[in-house]
Image (tube, grey):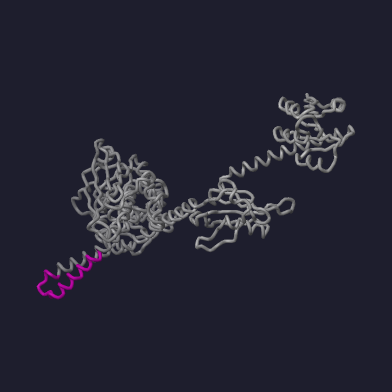
Amino acid sequence: MTTSRPRTSVLIVEDEGIIAQNLRELLIGFGYDVLGIASTSDQAMAYASERCPDVVLMDIRIKGKLDGIATAELLTKQFAVPIVYLTAHADAATIERAKQTQPFGYLTKPVRPDELRSAIEIARYKCAMEIRLRERERWLATTMRSIADAVVMVDLAGRITFLNPAAETLLGVTQSEALGRPAREVVRIHEADGTPLEAPLDRALREGKVHFLAEGVLEGRGGDSSVIISDSAAPVIDDKRLLGAVMVFGDVTEQKRLQKQIEVADRLASLGTMAAGVAHELNNPLAVVVGNGAVVGEMLGRLLSRLASEPGAGEGTVRLLRDAIDAQQDIVSAANRIAQIVRDLRGFSRPELPASGSLNVREAIDWALRTTAQEFRHRARVSTKLGNVPRIKGDETRVGQILVNLLINAAHAIAPGNVEANEVSIATRTDDQGRVVIEVTDTGCGIPPEALGRIFDPFFTTKAVGTGTGLGLSISHGIAASMGGTLTVDSRVGQGTTFRLTFPAAAEAETSASTAPVSIAEQRRGRVLVIDDEDAVLAVVARILRDHEVVCLSDAGQALARLKQDSNFDIILCDLMMPKMTGMEFYEKLLAERPEMAPRVVFVTGGAITAKSDLFLKTVPNERIQKPFGLGVLRAAVQRILAEGHRP
């Protein structure tokens, strides 16, 4: 079923009755719908008000105060109806007046029927096209005004023809103020160092191609150059004819700031990865220094005892030997200090894993204070008031990371140069609900009230540009929340700040595990297999365990082959990270091939530098010894394992 097209409605405005009736009959014969015949302007307006016609046939000379041209002007203004003049007057003055009303046709009487019909059809079509064009223009203008980015359009002379509201805001000028002005006077852009840039619109007009600017500084009306923009300018071309140019640009100041912050964060992440690797690499030579130093000290001590007991020993020789022992102790002490720094560095850069077990709050605080000690040297005294608090569930490194961030912020809130007048304190207590509370308080500059609400937002910082990433407090807040805790802040400008961490206490089952060493009734001698890719480490382990039978191998694959032929080892000391076969791979193969020997493996490691290795150490039950190890630590571990009877 098809629907017939609505008939075109026509209003006849003609004060000659006979002519009007003839027109009516003619139009009806053509199939048009004649709304009526008006002889005056008032009648024409009344008809149009009741039902707006599709076309008006207008005689210029009609009755009343207003002639046809004036009436046509009213009808066009109020109803946007197309006018076709049908008149006997064709003089130049009349035609000129009629042109001002933008008619869709002008026919002189007497008119031929085919000309009348053609004029009506063309008027109807042109009117429909103009309506569609106006709708498109209105839609385009609305769209341009609604675009969030700034839009500036110019003509061929580079003078502004359009600004959208976003452009008005960024440029600090209204469209009415900018229209007709050269774009280069309104849109002024320069580089970060102040070097002026060619006006993008001028360049687009001159080169006839699209021009992109990734980053430029927009100079506002008052000379404010703090807005960074990214823009594109392109010529407007219609059918190979240049009509003007358009520029679209947006404020990317915040985006660029965040990008720089992310770059800093990425560098910090890379630094953390590098720190983990450096710490691991340092631990092998440190193990050699610490272990050999301890062995040398032991040997020197025995030699001194022997010389001191001999009557003929010279005093000078004994004194020289004692000086050598003092020097050796200083070496070992310095090496142990370096080892502690490496352990702290390794712990801070360790891959994040789900929290398991519980932690001693005081140990986390000690770690954080050691790590940040240098920050306070020229700024403030550091004091502690550590009450007895229960353990909390979580990871010591993650809590330490929070405390490091808080302590560094506390230090940076205090200007250097007046240590005795300033203090940073850290205190622990339990609240009424039995939760563990850790407070870090400083006597620094304080935080403005308007910033307190955003202090935990990512990338928000009150520090000067280049001195902070704005990530520390956000990360700390997230870590605390992930552990079921809270991080809050109290601050007064000029008086100082207190950050308060609150954590639920760990359950009793998580705190009752005993870590007391096994009592060793007597020294036992065992057979030990040592696997490490560092020859110097193998040598120092052999020296420390010289009272045992020690077999050293530098390749885990060779160790597996050896164990197939000779499994009579009480302990297998295995490095975790090795180039050919890692300690993890060695353990998994041993577990598959000789599961009864897997419990004998003790991992001697310089640190887990990947999430996989860290997780491996947390999931396997085997004991581990951290490099660098002291003489007493390694010997005691071996005796304890022998006493526990790992050997079947």
Q: Quadrant of the N terminus?
A: top right
Of the pair 647 and 436, the residue shown nearer to us? 436
Q: Is residue 497 visible?
A: yes
Query: Furthest-top residue in view?
Result: 1
Quadrant of the image occupied by residue 165: top right
| Image x and y of residue 77, in percent | 70, 35
Query: Furthest-front residue in view?
Result: 65
Q: Residue at x 31, y 61 (%)?
A: 287
Of the pair 625 and 2, the residue shown nearer to us? 2
**For residue 178, side relative to residue 606 (left or right):** right
Q: Residue at x 64, y 43 (%)?
A: 141
Of the pair 122 and 403, the residue shown nearer to us? 122
**For residue 469, side relative to residue 255 (left or right):** left
| Image x and y of residue 198, in percent | 59, 61
**For residue 7, side relative to residue 198 (left or right):** right
Quadrant of the image occupied by residue 137: top right
Region of the chain picked out in magenta, as a range: 307-332
